[in-house]
Image (cartoon, rainbow, N blue to C red):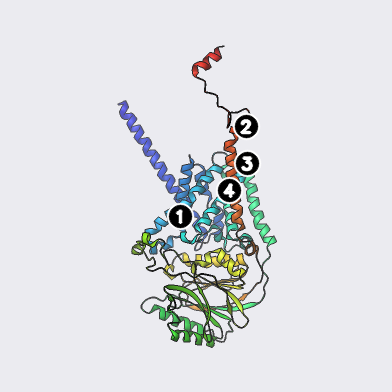
Amino acid sequence: MRGVRIAVARRDAVRRLLVSRWWRAAAAVAAGALPALAFPAPSWWWFAYVALVPWLLLIRTAPTGGRAALDGWLGGLGFMLALHHWLMPSLHVFILVLAALLGLLWAPWGWLVRLMLARAPSRGRAAAAVVVVPSGWLMVELVRSWEGLGGPWGLLGASQWQVDAVLRVASLGGVWLASLLVVGVNTAVAVLVSVPSARTAAVAGLAVCALTAGTAWWWVPSPRPAGEVRVAVVQPGVINGVGGAERRVARGEELTRELAGRDVDLVVWGESSVGADLAARPDLARRLAALSREVGAEVLVNVDARRSDRPGIYKSSVLIGPQGPTGDRYDKMRLVPFGEYVPLRSLLGWATSVGKAAAEDRRRGTQPVVMAVGDEGLRLGPLVCFESAFPDMSRRLARDGARLLVAQSATSTFQDSWAPGQHASLAALRAAETGRPVVHATLTGVSAVYGADGAPIGSPLGTQRSASAVYDIPLSDATTPYARFGDWPVYAALAVLAVLLAAEAVRSLGPLSRPGRPGRGRPVPPARTARESSARRGR
């Protein structure tokens, strides 16, 4: 009977352990998903400052470093899944695979959180955590910003696109500094609620974050207007079915003709607004040239077609003047994984059979282009689709002399999801970072325009609209600190982590090198046996 009771007790213990592990795993996934609510469509920007707290508190209670890394991975999986849930209709089950792979990036971050916050950290360690934990998070954002891993969509700092003070922070250090600020506040709040002995350090951390935002607001001036340009955005709306490409061009022409007499300087169409190579379709090129003459402005279209002068399909921003294409052309450089090409197609080509992955890889452009528009020579920097998510691309265009940035996009595949709003919000960050106004023009919404400080200009065109809109956009020649100095917050975060690793190495080796204690270069005395110890005590 005793053996039976022991067996039953062991079985119950194992069952409780498994249940507790499953509940902890589910809690990690759910906690990791919370920050997605800070992005459009919910746009709870204020929630970003506490959204990481449940995840941080869960990780700090992990019994081992391995378990903390697992909590980090599962939370990262939840975050990626919540942030990209609108991809499910296109990728189906493959979205789970991608989320699990990207979630692995947060495993080292989970280990780092436990290292800094486990048990009862000292005041000094808690204060250091407010800097170290955000630095670790930034490394995750940096790695996943690589195009091959999906690009910098959903960087935590981008959730603050409508907060003036944080936009000023972005002009100082880009979206990277904004992410550091948000994670720093979360870390300080986590310390405040979980480590009573370190509450002073937590309050100090919150003060530093507030001081950073205040310094940016005071030190970085708002861009001063230097001229103005009148830009029209043409959004044809959802057009599907047979002959969709031709009907889309026809609707674009109809909306553009309505702009005649409104004294616009530039008309912008969305991504894939023209579905035929203009060199192979001189009739279409002549129609667009006539449209430019009728409106009295050049038209920036986006051609998504197989080129006649080189092999493959390109997405290209093409400027059309009264005489036809002006010769200014930009070929998209950074393509959407699976949407426009399949990474490692020989290995992952099966994704085309379970979702809407690209059946044929599109070709890449080789360099950014700055276009001259109109008689006054307005310098325009075009971006295509999710290239507006990459801070370095808009910064490069601004440094090359672009005074206006234009992002041509199409999110019709995800029309009734969070994607259109999230995509449009990125333009506000790019404007604030570069000190250049940004026009985000789409086929089906959301189309929006942001000034050089990231503030919205006029009213956006929503996803239910088929219309054109005219925006009077102040230009600026100011150079923001971020445009001048680049990704310095990333290097600062790397330096913080390097110092931490060096300090941990010294701490672990320190006792071995202290005088009078066993250590390196000193023989370790043999352990006394129990009999020897008893004999010494009996003397």
- Residue 124 showing in the rendered view: yes
Residue tagged 2: 514
Q: Is residue 522 left or right of residue 98?
A: right
- Residue 270 showing in the rendered view: no
Q: Residues within 10 Å of mark 3 (few under 14, many from 20)?
A: some
Residue tagged 1: 102
Marks 1/3 in contact by CB < 8 Å: the verdict is: no
Q: Given the image, on which type of amino acid does mark 3 rest?
A: Arg
Give whichever of discs 1 and 2 has the lower sequence position.
1
Which circle, 1 or 3, is nearer the viewer? 1
Residue tagged 3: 123
Give whichever of discs 1 and 3 has the lower sequence position.
1
Q: Percent from the top left, x then y, of residue 66?
A: 46, 42
Give whichever of discs 3 and 4 has the lower sequence position.
3
Where 325 falls versus 435 (above or below)?
below
Distance from Cα at disc 2 to Cα at disc 3: 25 Å
Q: Percent from the top left, x then y, of residue 85?
A: 43, 60
Local secondary structure at mark 2: loop
Q: Residues within 10 Å of mark 1 (few under 14, many from 20)?
A: many
Which circle, 4 or 1, is nearer the viewer? 4
Q: Given the image, on which type of amino acid does mark 1 rest?
A: Leu
Marks 2/3 in contact by CB < 8 Å: the verdict is: no
> Looking at the image, which residue is at 43% across and 47% down?
25
Q: Percent from the top left, x then y, of residue 486?
A: 61, 61
Which circle, 3 or 4, is nearer the viewer? 4
